[in-house]
Amino acid sequence: MFEAYQLPPPPIVLDAAIGLWRRGLLQQDLLATTARVLEGFVLGSIVAIALATVTGLSARAERALEPTLQALRTVPTLAWAPLLLLWLGIDEPPKVALVAIGAFFPVYVSLVAGITGVDRKLVEVAQVFDLARGEIARRVILPAALPDLLTGMRLGATQAWLFVVVAEFFGSSRGLGFRLTDSQQSTRVDFMFVAIVALAILGKLTDTLIRVVERRVLRWRDTIGVARR
Amino acid sequence: MSRPLIIRELRKRYGDRPVLGGLDVEIAPSEIVAIVGPSGCGKSTVLRLVAGLDTRYHGEIRVGDETICGPHPAVGLVFQEPRLFPWLDVAGNVAFGLHERSSPRAADLVRAALAAVDLAPFGTALPKELSGGMAQRVALARSLVVEPQVLLLDEPFNALDAFTRMRLQDHLLAAWARYRPTLVLVTHDLDEAVYLADRVLVLGERPGRVIDVIPVATPRPRDRRDPALAALRVALLEAVHLERTTAAVA
Ligand SMILES: Nc1ncnc2c1ncn2[C@@H]1O[C@H](COP(=O)(O)OP(=O)(O)OP(=O)(O)O)[C@@H](O)[C@H]1O
Ligand SMILES: [Mg+2]
């Protein structure tokens, strides 16, 4: 169906990977992309957790913020890129920011859903003990919403890997996304495949890592498949 | 360490439907009072109001000389379901209402409360590993450990089989003997009412109010086969039944 130059067989891709590694380029790309994902993901998650806690717990904050956030959520990824370049220059900040935006929404949406879905019956137990609102939030609502938060973070991590590629299309000189566009221009399809396989492996690794954390942290859950979800 | 619970002219409505129509009762310190009555007559509502979960009512609720206008640290409530926090182990659940939960003193209190409900070895178990009866005992220990002066129980043993229920009734009495709270127990089980209580209040419905009070003078420990208790049970049944038939006529 495809010619070898369109779809290189695995041994050729492997050779290409080894070649890139010998020249130090593969390491450089992996490092650059992973750093951006990590920074953006952490940043996006922190902001998401902070905002979701506020809007989840306060109806007033929700009325104030929710419409804006919903509107922002519908902005396509590609539309953000030129704007961020304009605002934040062409170095690392706009790339990290784009990744952060990618991670933000899944984490935010899941955590708000988790917080507003907390069983009122558990909250009542804390109320009977005369706990203050902040105590109830910290000791009942947030732990109860933790499963949703972790689900959101898994989706957020996936999004972060998608967004980083887009971020690296614009004005970068290293990274797997850069390698992808650069090899396309120089028609090195084998290099393109190295980048794609690397992205797939890293994405999968991140997902597995968060699953492991999830399984650890949610040991208390009484469900049919903490591990399988 | 226990305080009286005084309820005067307690009225409550949901929308335009009156649920409680002037409930009056005075419960002495360390007294055990059982409340029985038809479904929907407002028994849970009374407990929720006394626990401060709902402050929109008319009338007066006092614990000692303090008026209840919200949750009060001296008033505990055991719900119909265990309502354990699934992410905390048993000891963590029991310690939930304590102030310094990581202190050695807290650990001692938790241990004592778990022993009082016969669950000493289960401190590190998770709620999902417990049977229904065990979970309900943990809920009881969680309420006892803060040594409430008034403890309210809303049909706490209802979902359990007769055997477990009788064991839990004895656990409750043992815990009561240890902590001596004023105890208000809502139940559908007339045997449970006469076995545990010093007084049984019969509530009538629409709107809920006290229609009969049956004192149980038999000293503790009581024998479940005691004919005096059986006779009281019959009296109680008649009181409940009478309410049913008059309600049906009305
Ligand atoms: N949140 C609520 N909103 C509206 N009506 C309510 C609410 N809670 C209770 N009610 C009504 O108040 C009445 C008393 O309810 P309550 O739960 O106190 O009854 P109960 O005596 O505990 O009944 P049961 O024995 O079935 O538990 C019922 O008719 C119920 O429909
Ligand atoms: Mg009820």
Image: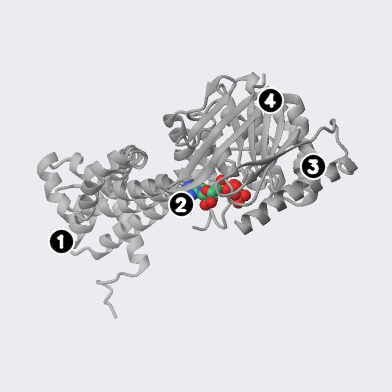
The quarter of the picture where residue A189 lies is: bottom left
Q: CA distance from mark 1 to mark 3?
A: 79 Å
Q: Which mark is residue B28?
A: 4
- Compared with A14, B2 (above or below) is above
Q: List the residue tagged with mark 1.
A: A185
**Co-location on one chain, circles 4 and 1:** no
**Co-location on one chain, circles 2 and 1:** yes
- Compared with A50, A95 (above or below) is below
Residue drawn 42% across and 52% down? A207
Q: Which mark is residue B191?
A: none
Give the chain letter at badge 2.
Answer: A
Q: List the residue tagged with mark 2.
A: A208
In contact (CB < 8 Å): disc 4 and disc 3 = no
Say left or right for B82 vs A114: right
Q: CA distance from mark 4 to mark 1?
A: 88 Å
Residue drawn 20% across and 50% down? A72
Q: List the residue tagged with mark 3.
A: B167
Q: CA distance from mark 2 to mark 1?
A: 33 Å
Observer able to see residue A127: yes
Which element is circle 2 on?
Answer: helix
